[in-house]
Amino acid sequence: MNAKQFVDNWVSLKSQLLASFMDSHDGSEVAARINALQLTPSQHSQLRDILDSALRDTMYTLLLGLDGAGSIGDAEQQSYTLQDESGNVISECGELEAAAWEAFHGQD
């Protein structure tokens, strides 16, 4: 796995989470709370867009933190080396930032 594939997995997770949150039959707590709001179709669409933006920004920020291009929480900004279970390096410093920008913001 390389940095792009790693980021692509996060993009996929974002899509899965958003679908789960917005599916009234999913059974998740988030889906149940949204369903309880009894939103109009327009409101439902607006909420979907808001959650999509929140998930995108959250995942992008987390990836930047892992890359060393941003801090995680109140911690000092630093770089991390991502490795798979076999010790193969997934990402060198700076690779996640570029892949994350393209994946989360490049299509806009």
Image (spheres, rainbow, N blue to C red):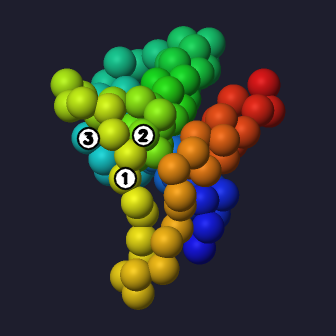
Label 2 vs label 3: CA separation?
A: 33 Å
Q: Give the class, few, some or many, for how many residues have Cα within 10 Å of label 3's Cα (few <14, many ≥20).
A: few
**Residue 71 at x, y = what percent?**
33, 30
Label 3 sits on a secondary structure element that is: helix
Label 1 sits on a secondary structure element that is: loop
Residue 5 placement, left or right of 74? right
> Given the current orientation, which residue lies at the most extreme right position?
107
Question: Which corner quadrant holds the C terminus?
Answer: top right
Q: Amino acid at mark 1?
A: Tyr
Nearer the viewer's eye, disc 3 or disc 1? 1
Q: Give the class, few, some or many, for how many residues have Cα within 10 Å of label 2's Cα (few <14, many ≥20).
A: many
Specify which label sits upstream in the sequence, 1 or 2.
Answer: 2
Q: Give the class, few, some or many, for how many residues have Cα within 10 Å of label 1's Cα (few <14, many ≥20).
A: few
The residue indicated by pointer 3 is 29
Q: Amino acid at mark 2?
A: Gly
Q: Residue at x 40, y 81 (%)?
A: 87
The residue indicated by pointer 2 is 68
Q: Residue at x 50, y 27 (%)?
A: 57
Task: Say the numbered circle drawn on residue 80.
Answer: 1
Specify whether residue 24 is in view. no
Label 3 vs label 1: CA separation?
A: 33 Å
Label 1 vs label 2: CA separation?
A: 7 Å
Question: Which corner quadrant holds the N terminus?
Answer: bottom right
When asked about the image quadrant of residue 45, the answer is top right
Q: How many marks?
A: 3
Specify which label sits upstream in the sequence, 3 or 1.
Answer: 3
